[in-house]
């Protein structure tokens, strides 16, 4: 039996002073932010580590502590025409605090002048306002409430603020986080001076992240451990490609010298085009392929890309239905789309369709629906491939075919609608809490979805798709 990765098995690994507070210890943050800190440290450009704060009660703090906060990252794929198959032990996390059992340690972070940066990824659900949160809770439930309590203590101690860069995949994440912090400050009556300090001493940035991180390599962990010669319960796999767009002042690039370290980080005063491109041309096709491919029995993004019918679907969806609707230079969209197709084909990582399917309804709403509606407005008819995927999504949410992974609220809406099969499509499309509007008002949409569901049921997903590609 090999030993668990730790500073005992690897006594010569370096440590760095704490400079960043990071909310979120999930796969993505460890393969994205902490990996980038490591690259800057490797080049002597940052000399810093992150303290991780576990945002919810259950998480990886125990496993990270068991491994002295070390873990291995595997980068596998093709970058700039070169095959990359690298592994590295990440040493840029100093410790992990679980505020549910270590609230005092958490609040003590406010006392340390060494901290300059705050980052986060608490999923799309994390940047939310919970009215029941109070300053006196230990800890508060929501991430923004926890952050407000920490910032307030920092202010009371008369210390400088932070550069705050959330990575959650929601639009205008930095502004949204700032708004909720201000809402708590007002609700908790923390005073005008604190509100002024928040504004003057802190820089909230919006950011957009891009790196495919399938996470723990369940299928080959044992083989990898045998190769490494140690056990690692929190190893993480990712693609080599990375993009971080940070909307904020130019001086951020000096204090966080990502670009100097050769990392693909853009600091800009307008991240909108980058977001449009990524959310609609990468996340959109992911979300569109999932229900059709799962119904056809495929398991991974790579399976989709190696399948003639399904890869044609993805390519045509991008070229015929998504790109023409995006308000960006066509050439750059085509170049981006080509790069995304290459990334989807990555033969070295196993990106499970079932993991992408989590919360597919809200993903469809943000990643595809705006483009579908724009297409209808511009062309006066509906996009064929997107509506087939939409039909497959509704079919897969009936609960009689695929395992669904979504909130109880969403699943209850579908279960209730399916109690009356004849009105199922109408009831679901009408549900404004799912789509932000009544979709039965979109010309022809109900009929097209009804027709596509029939096709999918009668012919199966592959044959229904073959009629269109
Ligand atoms: N995996 C990828 O390829 C990838 C790429 C870009 C962005 N992302 C985004 O990153 C997010 C996390 O992905 P991951 O792969 O690290 O998942 P993960 O399950 O490994 O980590 C999830 C993290 O979010 C926290 N969290 C979960 N629910 C929360 C809640 N309700 N409130 C506060 N915190 C909560 C958890 O504590 C954990 O730190 C996802 O929302 C995803 O959209 C993922
Ligand atoms: O991470 P999710 O579940 O929000 O979405 C699934 C994928 O579309 C997503 O993880 C992409 O791989 C990622 O956004 C690429 O940067």
Image (spheres, rainbow, N blue to C red):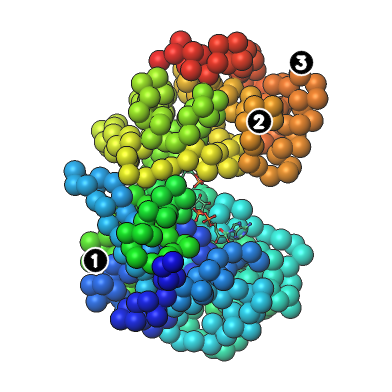
Q: Nearer the viewer, mark 2 or mark 1?
A: 2
**For the N terminus, which image quadrant?**
bottom left
Residue 412 badge: none
User: Can residue 183 be seen in the rendering of this structure?
Assistant: no
Mark-to-mark CA distance, 2 and 3: 16 Å
Dividing the picture into quadrants, the one containing residue 180 is bottom right
Mark-to-mark CA distance, 2 and 1: 45 Å
Q: Residue at x 36, y 21 (%)?
A: 308
Is 84 placed left or right of 174 in the picture?
Answer: left
Indicate yes or no: mark 3 CB to ligand 2 under 8 Å.
no
Dividing the picture into quadrants, the one containing residue 11 is bottom left
Residue 261 badge: 1
Is 79 placed left or right of 307 in the picture?
Answer: left
Q: Measuring from the top left, give residue 34's x and y in whole percent.
A: 39, 66
Mark-to-mark CA distance, 1 and 3: 59 Å
At mark 2, the secondary structure is loop
Q: Residue at x 34, y 65 (%)?
A: 229
Residue 397 badge: 2
Q: Which residue is label 3 attached to?
A: 422
Q: Measuring from the top left, give residue 264's x and y in whole percent.
A: 28, 56
Name the one closer to the observer, 4 or 20.
4
Is 280 placed left or right of 83 in the picture?
Answer: right
At mark 3, the secondary structure is helix
**For the C terminus, which image quadrant?**
top left
User: Can residue 291 be seen in the rendering of this structure?
Assistant: yes
Q: Residues within 10 Å of mark 3 (few under 14, many from 20)?
A: few
């Amino acid at each position: 039996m090999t030993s668990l990765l730790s500073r005992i098995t690897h006594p010569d690994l370096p440590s760095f002073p704490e400079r960043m507070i990071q909310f979120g210890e999930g796969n993505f943050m460890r393969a994205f932010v902490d990996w980038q800190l490591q690259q800057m440290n490797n080049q002597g450009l940052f000399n810093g580590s992150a303290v991780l704060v576990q945002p919810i009660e259950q998480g990886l703090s125990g496993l990270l502590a068991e491994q002295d906060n070390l873990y291995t990252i595997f980068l596998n794929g093709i970058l700039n025409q070169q095959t990359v198959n690298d592994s590295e032990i990440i040493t840029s996390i100093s410790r992990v605090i679980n505020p549910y059992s270590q609230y005092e340690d958490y609040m003590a972070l406010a006392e340390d002048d060494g901290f300059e940066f705050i980052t986060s990824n608490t999923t799309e659900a994390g940047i939310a306002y919970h009215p029941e949160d109070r300053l006196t809770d230990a800890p508060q439930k929501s991430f923004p409430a926890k952050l407000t309590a920490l910032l307030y203590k920092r202010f009371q101690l008369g210390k400088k603020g932070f550069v705050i860069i959330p990575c959650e995949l929601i639009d205008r994440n930095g502004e949204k986080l700032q708004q909720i912090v201000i809402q708590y400050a007002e609700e908790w009556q923390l005073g005008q001076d604190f509100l002024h300090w928040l504004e003057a001493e802190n820089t909230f940035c919006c950011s957009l992240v891009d790196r495919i991180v399938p996470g723990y390599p369940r299928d080959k962990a044992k083989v990898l451990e045998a190769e490494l010669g140690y056990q690692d319960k929190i190893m993480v796999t990712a693609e080599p490609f990375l993009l971080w767009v940070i909307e904020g002042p130019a001086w951020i690039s000096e204090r966080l010298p990502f670009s100097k370290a050769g990392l693909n980080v853009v600091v800009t005063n307008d991240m909108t085009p980058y977001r449009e491109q990524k959310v609609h041309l990468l996340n959109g096709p992911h979300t569109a392929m999932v229900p059709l491919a799962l119904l056809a029995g495929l398991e991974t993004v790579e399976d989709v890309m190696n399948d003639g019918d399904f890869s044609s679907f993805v390519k045509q969806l991008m070229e015929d239905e998504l790109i023409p609707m995006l308000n960006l230079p066509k050439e750059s969209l085509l170049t981006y789309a080509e790069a995304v197709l290459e990334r989807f084909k990555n033969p070295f990582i196993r990106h499970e369709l079932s993991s992408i399917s989590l919360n597919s309804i809200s993903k469809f709403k943000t990643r595809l629906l705006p483009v579908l509606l724009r297409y209808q407005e511009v062309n006066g008819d509906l996009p064929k491939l997107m509506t087939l995927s939409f039909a497959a999504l509704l079919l897969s949410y009936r609960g009689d075919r695929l395992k669904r992974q979504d909130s109880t609220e969403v699943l209850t809406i579908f279960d209730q609608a399916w109690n009356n099969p004849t009105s199922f499509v109408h009831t679901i499309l009408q549900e404004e809490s799912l789509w932000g509007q009544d979709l039965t008002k979109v010309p022809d949409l109900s009929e097209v979805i009804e027709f596509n569901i029939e096709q999918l049921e009668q012919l199966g997903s592959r044959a229904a798709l073959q009629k269109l590609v």
